[in-house]
Image (tube, coloured by chain):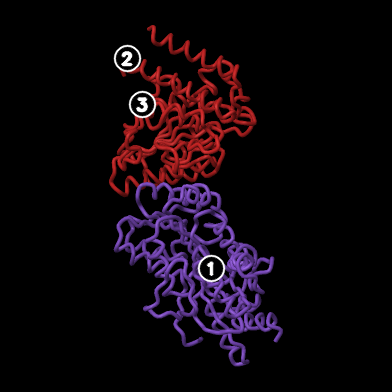
Chain colours: A purple, B red
Amino acid sequence: MADVKKIATRESYGNALKELGAEHEDLVVLDADLANATKTNTFQKAFPDRHFDCGIAEANMMDVAAGLSTMGLVPFASTFAMFAAGRAFEQVRNTIGYPHLNVKIGATHGGITVGEDGASHQCCEDFALMRVIPGMTVLCPADDVEARQMVRAAYEMEGPVYMRFGRAATPVFHDESYRFVIGKGEVVAEGSDVAVVATGVEVPEAMEAAKLLAAEGISVRVVNMATIKPLDEALVIESAKKCGRIVTVEEHEIFGGLGEAVCGVLAEKLPTPVKRLGLHDVFGHSGTAGELLHEFGLDGAGIAAGIREFLGK
Amino acid sequence: MTDREKKDLQLAAVRVREGILTATHGAKCGHPGGSLSAADVFTYLYFREMRIDPKNPRWSDRDRFVLSKGHTAPGLYSVLANRGFFPTEDLPTLRHLGSYLQGHPNMSTVPGVDMSTGSLGQGLSAAAGMAKGAKVLGKDVNVYALCGDGEIAEGQIWEAAMFAAHYKLDNLCVIVDVNGLQIDGPTAQVMNSAPLDEKFAAFGCDVVWAYGHDFDALEAAFACFHANHGSGKPTAILLKTLKGKGVSYMEGQVGWHGKAPNDEEYARGMAELAAARAALEEV
């Protein structure tokens, strides 16, 4: 995909905030000394009076956002996924989730594609942590086009939303006519032997795997599941009926993330063999994003290998 | 404050204390000690200080109150009920299955509760967010947060204090109920927070000490908060109080932090409060 335009979804987040900020005066942005990394500095330059740097104090930032929301503002609280979902978990659970406040959490640097910073900053647990909070919407875009629409959709809905964005530049495969809808997955490649349900940066990797396998006569459906919660159960069931086997792919521990969400639906409604690709009870480590995707079997070639093994081919 | 106004506040505070006993007795659990130590400041805030409308609890220009020490919900519920936000008859349903009076304040179910709290250390941050929001929106809204002197061991309190001073939230008033006792014992022994005044001053607040059971002292302390408007400084009011104040057998007793009165203790406490009310009415 060397000739494809690549943009990190954190860039999309910053650009979308700026665009929305021009339309909505009630939109405010908080950051925790990472505005240059989360890209909220794009918004900050345009609307300095509506960007509040909270310093390196994520717990306080989340509860400040809760307070701001009760005044009728729509805060986007931004930091790395590790600190948004991890450090500030209980603030998000008790002071945003429990009162179901209209706070949007923009968590960048999700997953192993954080790269060189290593395991301390590679959050592979955030889907699990955020999914279990009652009423929390959990989103993860696959490319720039989807990410920008996601920020708008999050603004337009009432209630708490967690959005995971990536650090690494990844292929833009949607065109501007694409319309993201919260709670709806998208079939990005049709196939009938196996359905891959992927999210985030794993969607273009799964599309690559589908191309590799097509050459071997294996027909792969690829589903972009940008909404982790509420899950598009109908699309999961339809994919299981059509293909008979499901592979899930995510830059996340295999515990508690998209894979287990899919398994939960299928176990109750249509028992179907599933293989979960992700991190298998291990932490990441330093390396480039590409090296790490390869090492953990989460690049196109690795996903293709996982599918072959699953299909016994 | 006229003598008549002061007596009305004192009578209201007795009713608030009666409600605390009634609620915790009805619940057979809950936290009377820290509710009683804060009963006078609850009364002062809701009967004199804050711009609120019990008929319109969600009025957008109202002053806000955040009970950061959320376990003293019986005190907040009692003052809200006595102020007319909901019937005092509902207080004994505290903590019961199906009651809107949850064990810790729930803004989604209780009229007049501005923020859900209970997990210590978080309320001051939420209050700071409200104060910042009021500034952003150009609203003349004051925000009050009540913390415990045990609670302030939570590091987030100091993150919030730093934020409040940095953003010049002179519309924010943090109140600390310094009753000196927490669940495990005297605060000085469990985790010494002294000197509180120097700590809040170092974090950029204007600090005022007051005796928390004297309405003249409370009026003077909140006058300092109003005087600080325009200064860019948040105000910290440190209230010297007595845990369990107003019910003799609970006063200064750490054991009454989180225990409800039984039938006999409830009757004794209510009799003491009735006597206090009668004494006030005689004068």
Mark 1 Cα shell of 10 Å, populated few (<14), some (14-19), many (≥20): some
Q: Are marks 1 and 3 on the same chain?
A: no
Q: Are marks 1 and 2 on the same chain?
A: no
Q: Subunit of mark 2?
A: B
- Residue that carries the numbered disc 1 in the rendered image: A233
Report if residue A300 is visible in the image.
Answer: yes
- Residue that carries the numbered disc 2 in the rendered image: B4
Mark 2 Cα shell of 10 Å, populated few (<14), some (14-19), many (≥20): few
Give x and y (percent) for residue A245: 63, 78
Per the image, label 3 sits on a secondary structure element best described as helix
Whole-Å distance between the Cαs marked 2 and 3? Answer: 14 Å
Per the image, label 1 sits on a secondary structure element best described as helix
Q: Subunit of mark 1?
A: A
Establish if A167 lies above or below B57.
Answer: below
Q: Subunit of mark 3?
A: B
Per the image, label 2 sits on a secondary structure element best described as helix
- Residue that carries the numbered disc 3 in the rendered image: B47
Give x and y (percent) for residue B241: 50, 23
Left or right side of B236 for A280: right
Total numbered labels = 3
The answer to which of marks 2 and 3 sits earlier in the sequence is: 2
Give x and y (percent) for residue A60: 48, 48
Residue type at mark 2: give it.
Arg
